[in-house]
Image (tube, rainbow, N blue to C red):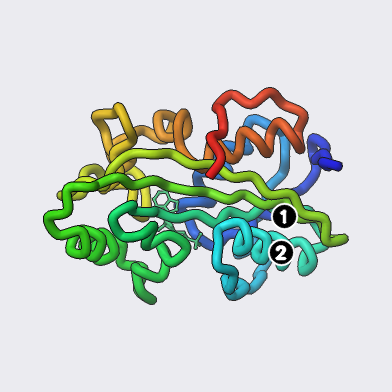
Amino acid sequence: MPRRIDPGRKLVLASHNPGKLREIESLLRPHGVEVVSAGALGLPEPEESAPDFAGNARIKALAAATASGLPALSDDSGFCVAALGGEPGVLSARWAGPSKDFNAAMAAVNEKLGDTEDRRAWFVAALCLAWPDGHTETFLGRVDGSAVWPPRGGKGFGYDPIFLPTGGLLTFGEMEPDEKHAISHRARAFAQVLASCFGRVASSSGSGA
Ligand code: IMP
């Protein structure tokens, strides 16, 4: 049975990634929920040991909800390339190494692709809401496109500069935040969170993942 989050209720954002925090905060802003980040509460980052996005999202949301005593929303997401068998996928953050060098991670994708013609790529986001009693709800969103080279634009984060959504002219790195929110994997998963937990009609359709 889906649970609701009441207006005015405090929600922990179970992420330490500044790019994701910025996007999730702006998606939540119109819905009257008070948000606090896991970092601001001094919560540790749990190990992401699951083999898939949904499992890792659940680990992060449950850890934050049980440690804080508040409902928590997590995001586990990644960039997947068809010709690389879906990699970097759940290892998207790890490809950037301990210094979080996403220029190096994007270069690694390009190098591995070499002159492969198949450039199909997609982003996946799993958003998980967890409550302190262990109840969880997980929502998946996906956006398809292609991996381009060289990187274009400095507006997003992570792999945004090498992702061109299907039918578009701008990479995610070249888009204004609102343009990315209109079609992104995260916004598609978030639309389902809104419909289920806030009782709002989704403004962006989720395609699942
Ligand atoms: P994790 O979910 O903490 O394992 O990290 C996911 C990684 O995937 C991020 O560090 C980014 O590199 C990448 N990623 C996820 N969503 C996006 C996005 O919207 N744009 C660009 N990169 C993303």
- Crowdedness of circle 1 by 10 Å Cα count: few (<14), some, many (20+)? many
Q: Specify whether residue 41 is in view.
A: yes
Pointer 1: what residue? 72
Q: Percent position (x, y) of residue 198?
A: 75, 33
Q: Percent position (x, y) of residue 112?
A: 21, 64
Labelled pair 2, 1 in contact (Cβ < 8 Å): yes
Looking at numbered disc 2 in the image, what kind of residue is underneath it? Ala
Specify whether 177 is left or right of 191: left
Asked if the beta carbon under badge 2 is closer than 8 A to the nearest atom of ligand 1, the reply is no
Q: Quadrant of the N terminus?
A: top right
Q: Is residue 133 above or below residue 166?
A: below
Pointer 2: what residue? 64
Hey, which quadrant is residue 111 in on the image? bottom left
Q: Specify whether residue 40 is in view.
A: no
Q: Is residue 18 above or below residue 27?
A: below
Quick one: SS at disc 2?
helix
Looking at numbered disc 1 in the image, what kind of residue is underneath it? Ala
Q: Percent position (x, y) of residue 93?
A: 42, 65
Specify whether 208 is left or right of 73: left
Nearer to me, 101 or 136:
136
Specify whether 95 is left or right of 19: left
Quick one: SS at disc 1?
strand
Nearer to me, 185 or 83:
83
Q: Percent position (x, y) of residue 35?
A: 68, 48
Hey, which quadrant is residue 70 in on the image? bottom right
Residue plotted at (46% across, 28% down): 182
Which of pointers 2 and 1 lies earlier in the amino acid sequence? 2
Distance between the alpha carbons at the discs numbered 2 and 1: 6 Å
Residue plotted at (29% across, 28% down): 168
